[in-house]
Amino acid sequence: MIKAVRCHRFAGLDAEGNPVSTPDSVVEVLSLDEISRPECEPGTILVSVNYAGIQYPDFLQAQGFYQQKPVLPYVPGMDATGTVLEIGVGVERFQVGDRVVGQMNIGCLAEVVKVPKESVWKVPDEVQLSRCANLGRNFFPAYHSLKILGEVGPESLVLVDGASGGVGMAAIELAKAMGALVIAGVSVDAKKALPESAGADRVFCYGRDRKSHRQFKDEVRQASVELGHPEGVDVVVDMVQGELFEAALVSVIRPLGRICLVGFTAGQKPIRPGILLIKQVAAIGSIWAGWAKANPEDHQNNVSEILRFMSTGVIQPRADRLFPIDEFSKAFELFEQNAGRGNTVLCIKPE
C-alpha cells in the first residue's frame, strides 16, 4: 500500500453534477489515504515520487470546474519528480534509479506513480528534483505559446499577464532564455516582485477595473516604445482574459501580432471579431497536449530544450512554496485564497 491524496467529490458541484451557488472548501473533499500500489505495465515506468507539483488547474479540478472531470475518487496531480522504481516491457531509455520527471493528467500526488514512457524525462544532475516538479503544468504551455504559436525569437517583445503565477513565471523565464524582451502584468502591486525576480524588463499592474486596465494599456504602450517596439508587442501570453482582453491587450499588440489564450482567471468574456479584424491580430487557443500528441518528436525536442535551459543555468529552476505531504491542504488553500505564486510543490519524501 502507498499514501496518496484523493478527491472524493467535487467541491463546486451537487450530487447531480450541477454547479452550487457557494462551493465547499476543496479541503473538505480531499484526504490523505492508503491505496494499492500501481502495477508496472508494458510501455510504462513506475516512479518513486519525491516531489509533486500543485497548481491552479488541480484546484479547479477538485472543484469540478476544470475541462476534465475524472472518475471519483481520483488522485490529483499532473507533475511528479522522483526515481525510476520499475520499468515495463518495451521501455529502453531508462534504468532503475534514474532521476526523472513525469507528466500526467491526474495521479501524481502519491508515493508511487505509473507514467507512460513517452511522458517521462531524465532530470539533469544539475537540477534539484524539487525545482522541476511543475515542468509539465507550467513550462509546457508557456513554451508552446512562445515557440510554436508565437514564434518568439531574439529581440521579440512579449507581454505576459497573470505573470506571478506558475505559467506566467515560466513564460517570462523561457522568453528571456529565447532572447526576447518581456513586459509582465500582475493584478496587484504586491505581486510584482516575482516577475521582477524572473527577469521581466518591465512590470506593471493592470488591476481589476477599467480605469486600471486603461492605465496598464498606456504603460505598456510607453514601455514598448522605450524597448524599441513602437508598433506594440509581438506576442501576448494571456492567462487572464476577462475585460482586460479588450480593454488593454488588443490595444497594445502590433498589427499581425498574436495573442495566445492560455487561461481565463478573470472569467470568460465574448471576443468581438471586429476588434481583431481592425487591429489585424490573431487570437489563438494554446493547448500544448493536442499538438504534442500530433508532433511527438518536436514535443520531445521542446522538453529537452527546457531542461537544457535549466541545467545550464539560463533558467534558474525554482520551488516557491514547498509543503510536506501531510500538509497538502495548505497547498490547495493557496489557490482557494487566490494566493498561488510561482511554483507550488508537495514533498512526498526529500531527495
Image (spheres, rainbow, N blue to C red):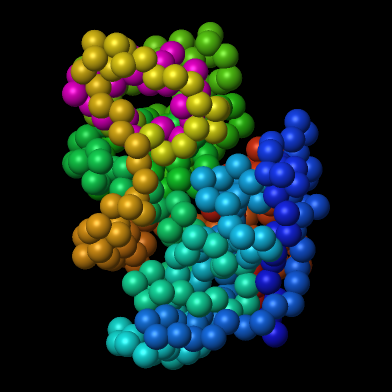
**Could you tell me which residue is drawn at 70 percent across and 49 percent down?**
10
* Res 317 seen here: no
* Relative depth, front residue between 304 and 36: 36
**Residue 34 drawn above or below residue 215:** below
Q: Position of residue 282 (x, y in %)?
A: 25, 26
For this view, does 258 lie left or right of residue 333? left
Magenta residues, start to end = 237-260
Quadrant of the frame with the C terminus? bottom right
**Could you tell me which residue is drawn at 68 percent across and 54 percent down?**
331
Q: Position of residue 197 (x, y in %)?
A: 47, 44
* Relative depth, front residue between 126 and 79: 79
* Relative depth, front residue between 249 and 312: 249
Residue 241 covered by magenta stretch: yes
Quadrant of the frame with the N terminus? bottom right
**Could you tell me which residue is drawn at 45 percent across and 51 percent down?**
138
Where residue 22 sits, quadrant-wise, is top right
Where residue 315 sits, quadrant-wise, is bottom left
**Residue 89 drawn above or below residue 168:** below
Residue 57 covered by magenta stretch: no
* Relative depth, front residue between 21 and 32: 21
Q: Position of residue 54 (x, y in %)?
A: 59, 56
Q: Position of residue 216 (x, y in %)?
A: 45, 17
For this view, does 106 lie left or right of residue 281? right
**Residue 18 drawn above or below residue 89:** above
**Residue 308 drawn above or below residue 211:** below
**Could you tell me which residue is drawn at 47 percent across and 64 percent down?**
104
